[in-house]
Amino acid sequence: MSSVLLALQEELAARLAADPLFAAVPVLTERERNLNYEVQRQVDSLGVVCLVLTPEAGVRHPEAPGPYLDQIAVTIRVQENVELNSGPHALEVAERAAALLHQFQPGAIAETLFAAAKTIVRQNDESLLTYDVCLETRDGFAKGETL
């Protein structure tokens, strides 16, 4: 895989899926085909789903060659159909995702992820109980690495 951000996304999904709590919670990535259908199918059948969104990247110093991506943000979205769910609550899943990924150093980037100032944020979704788990790097790629 040549995209660092896609490799990061896949690595985070694998880390979550390897945890025992996620044996009952499907972990999907935003790259899945027919994503909306798959999320709805999983929520309707199991009651809760975890979605690793595509990481976002920013550049603080546009004059530097590269670009040097030094603002990497990751969002893990947990959605629950409260009426159907008989497994872990969305908030429990969100808290576990935050615990698994806070201070985690993925191999895809040479930096550590940290919980953002607002780590677990409830979203306004009329049909599903939705929480976003927000994480970020403090620096970005290791010095000398560019795209």
Image: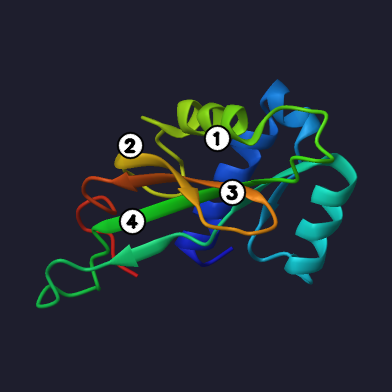
Q: Nearer the viewer, residue 142 or 47?
A: 47
Mark 1 or mark 4, whichever is nearer to me: 1
SS class of the residue under badge 3? strand
Residue located at (27% from left, 63% from top)? 69
On residue 114, the disc is 2
> Relative to 110, is 24 on the left or the right?
right
Counting residues from the start of the chain, the first of labels 1 and 2 encountered is 1
Mark 4 or mark 3, whichever is nearer to me: 3
| Residue 14, quarter of the rendered image | top right
Question: Which residue corresponds to mark 1?
Answer: 94
Mark 1 and mark 2: span between their CA atoms? 15 Å
Question: Which residue corresponds to mark 3?
Answer: 130
Counting residues from the start of the chain, the first of labels 2 and 4 encountered is 4
Mark 1 and mark 3: span between their CA atoms? 9 Å
Name the quarter where the N terminus is drawn: bottom right
On residue 59, the disc is none
Residue located at (55% from left, 35% from top)? 94
Q: Are marks 1 and 3 in contact (CB under 8 Å)?
A: no
